[in-house]
Amino acid sequence: MHGADESRPITYDDLRVETVLQAAKIMASSAITARKSGGQLFLRGSPLFMETVIVHDGATRKRLAAWMRTRGRERKEQIWFRDAAVCEAVDAILFVGLKDWYPPVYDCGACGYATCAEFLEATKALRDASEPFEFKGPQCNLRDIDLGIAVGSAAKTARKLGLIQADVAVALSLSMTHKSIGFDRRMPEVDFSAADPDPNAPASTRTLPIGAEGGEREGGRHKQQRVTDVRHRKL
């Protein structure tokens, strides 16, 4: 038996949360400081447009998983249920997104417009109308590349839950386990017509598109309803 002043072995539980959170903070710092297009704008005092959020408490991860399962029912896609289970099992999730971004003023034309100013003016109505979609857009191509450089992994649900305010976000799930939680995940069998047994699950994700009623599966995915008219109605 160890005395009060004696050293003792550091257990797995001692290390787990603290280590994962520390790693998440270092990763967030790396994402924020990663190279970005138009770096000279930062030297002139332009604000940072990368948003980072670390979610580690079980209640929030459970709420996120419930949202994902609801989204899976809406889209009639099993992958949302598979990843919802991982969301509940990991120790933390790091979200990184583009918030209040601005183009690098390179006037590169990759967006289809001659100048960055023309792109922003011409697409403002589209960005305002795209709130119901999983990502908000159109986005500057170079800023999307910047986001990919920063994290290199995608997620589509953080913004809808209010966990992160970014227009487009990606996520990294973090865990400290003897075996990778995501190593041998399998697609679950899902009855999309059955009610969600979780009483706290949201009735809707308020996100488009959704699975077409009676739509056959194609290419491994269920057909989704056309939503082009939704965007045009809001212009």
Image (spheres, rainbow, N blue to C red):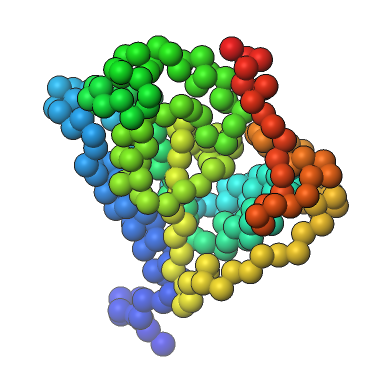
Q: Is residue 42 visible?
A: no
Q: Nearer the viewer, residue 119 or 2?
A: 119
**Position of 217 relative to 227 (above/below):** below
Q: Residue at x 52, y 67 (%)?
A: 182
Q: Residue at x 24, y 44 (%)?
A: 34
- Numbered-mark total: 0
In this image, 168 relative to 161: left or right?
left
Q: Nearer the viewer, residue 171 or 38?
A: 38
Q: Is residue 166 visible?
A: yes
| x, y percent for residue 43 | 14, 27
**Within the image, what quadrant is residue 121 found in?**
top left
| x, y percent for residue 10 | 36, 76
Q: Where the N terminus falls, by quadrant? A: bottom left
In this image, 194 relative to 152: left or right?
right
| x, y percent for residue 146 | 31, 39
| x, y percent for residue 126 | 52, 19
Q: Nearer the viewer, residue 167 or 125?
A: 125
Q: Where the C terminus falls, by quadrant? A: top right
Q: Nearer the viewer, residue 151 or 201?
A: 151
Q: Residue at x 74, y 42 (%)?
A: 211
**Position of 171 relative to 98 (above/below):** below
